[in-house]
Image: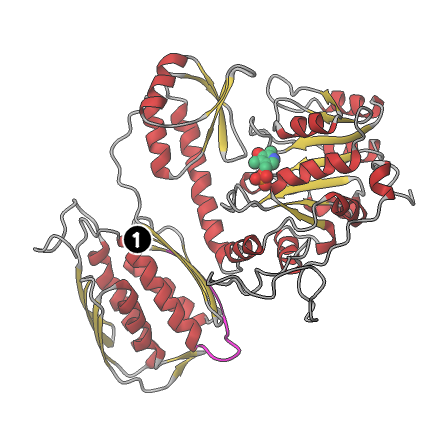
Amino acid sequence: MSNWPDNIARKAIVDFAAYSARGGSTGALHLDANESPYAPPPVKGAEEYNRYPEQQPPALRQRLADLYGTTAERIMVGRGADEAIEVLLRTFCEDGQDNILICSPTFGYYKTCAQIQGAGIIDVPLTKDYQWDTAAVLKRAKTARNLKIVFLCTPNNPTGTVINDNLVEQLCEACPETLIVVDEAYEEFSSLPSYTTKISSFQNLVAMRTLSKAYALAGVRGGVAIADPRVITLMLKVLPPYPIARPVEKAILAALSPAAMSTHAARLDEWLLERERMFTELQTSPFISKVWPSEANFLLIDVKDDETLMRELARRQVKIRDYRSTTGHMRISIGSPEENTVALKAFGIALPETRPDRIGEVHRTTKETDISVRVNLDDASAIKSDTGIGFYDHMLESLAKHGNFGLILTCKGDLEIDAHHTVEDCALALGTALKQALGDKAGIGRFGFVMPMDETQARVAIDLSGRAAMTFKGEFPTDHVGEFPAEMCPHVFESLAQTLGAAIQIDVEGENTHHMIEASFKGVARALRPAFARSGTDIASTKGVI
Ligand SMILES: *Cc1c(COP(=O)(O)O)cnc(C)c1O
């Protein structure tokens, strides 16, 4: 089809020329957009706020293309996936003539946008088990007249179920004049692969992704449609000229910085464990008759004792989504472990009192380094350091392992210059994260000491006093271990002491630099272990604060 996708788009959209607006700065003298030549008064990072942004800011578009494993020309960035839905309707559906197909119960905004645009809605409901009726969907799609868009949401909101056959591919082939839109707002939570990699095989396939759910950016508004470049070109005619405000672009790029991805992954792991816990625990609730398995970050539940449950939820100020009047069920999002525990109480599930894990997260981005650190003082099961300096990773992982805390650390540093910035900034960020995790320090041991280490001796004493102090005694026989400069060893502990707020005293003797550095890290780790360990709630100070 040479005129794809013009043959299915609204004629008015195909015929008009896109609104012409300059956004961004070409380096020329810009007297073409009635902008102010002045940056606004002191707002941090506001240098370019006086200039219109580009419709599709190139750096953002490229970052999202990389994130979703596609190319920039196949991406339309908008204010959330919601805007992508709206633009699809406005680009392809003629008022009073064209139709969309949905499989209810599903995300309500497809219907809303269709109604606003005046498009008809064909509904092929999910089966009783909330699965897609593949044969029925194919049949209706093939026979319907003027069917412009099929919206398939997988994992589906609100059921949490996923398409697990080749319905999408079959539809793409059977209905060449219809856009098959796969809404993957919850893809990150699913065990199935994304459809984004199939976009290049089907010119009528569209995938939608959002930063609002897995990437914690609902308040920033960012989402994409991924499709054949010709479909994207048409959609960009309908998208307003400047949908992405400059601070929004900055916020998204910062939250998706390469180093931050390891923190997103660690959070996702925890989130999925919580989904598992909620799925299991909720089944024991006296108010629930069924909990549906889910591949998203929410669970669909059938409730039986409505009134008591509603009272309990209100009493504990827990809000869940109520669909009882339409589909007879409710939907609960998976929150943090602490939030979930509160919710479980409202569902009448008595849990032994547990204290939340002490977690610290730090993101630190400078011109030299981009760092993301996540520590968990109460769960050492996940330990991974990725700084680009092999020996340093080995030392940091050893620090966490012997210190008995979880550590996920990623650093993208200017190693082409040298190791200095990376080593120092990671230590600073780690100290900050540990301090954050310690919180009010209730119940901690505060002090730690260790002595011997093979033929090398490291004597270490630590006090998590809140005051920074570091002394290091030791002479290294060589100046490097791998790419790691030996002189950075004391500097690491200096930086750590500074941001952690600790007194660290190290005295190391030996004949081999590798062993001496390793003994220092392990010694500090072993001393930190009893200092971090928590028992009871006492503050280990006569002053009542540390
Ligand atoms: C939340 C959600 C969206 C909208 O996401 P935004 O990017 O925040 O607009 C789209 N589709 C489904 C199925 C959703 O649940």
Residue flagged by tag 1: what amino acid is it?
Ala
Q: Taking 203 as reference, is 275 above or below it?
A: above
Which residue is pictured at 73% across the width and 34% down the height?
Answer: 89
Percent x, y of residue 540:
13, 54
Percent x, y of residue 64:
63, 53
* Residue 210 seen from this side: yes
Percent x, y of residue 417:
50, 80
Residue under circle 1?
437
Please report the bounds of the magenta region as a residue range.
407-419
Q: Quadrant of ligand 1?
A: top right
Answer with the quarter of the image where residue 249 lies. Answer: bottom right
Say whether residue 182 is left or right of residue 327.
right
Q: Nearer the viewer, residue 352 or 250?
A: 250
Say whether residue 341 is left or right of residue 322.
left
Which residue is pictured at 41% across the width and 22% down the height?
Answer: 283
Q: Secondary structure at mark 1?
A: helix
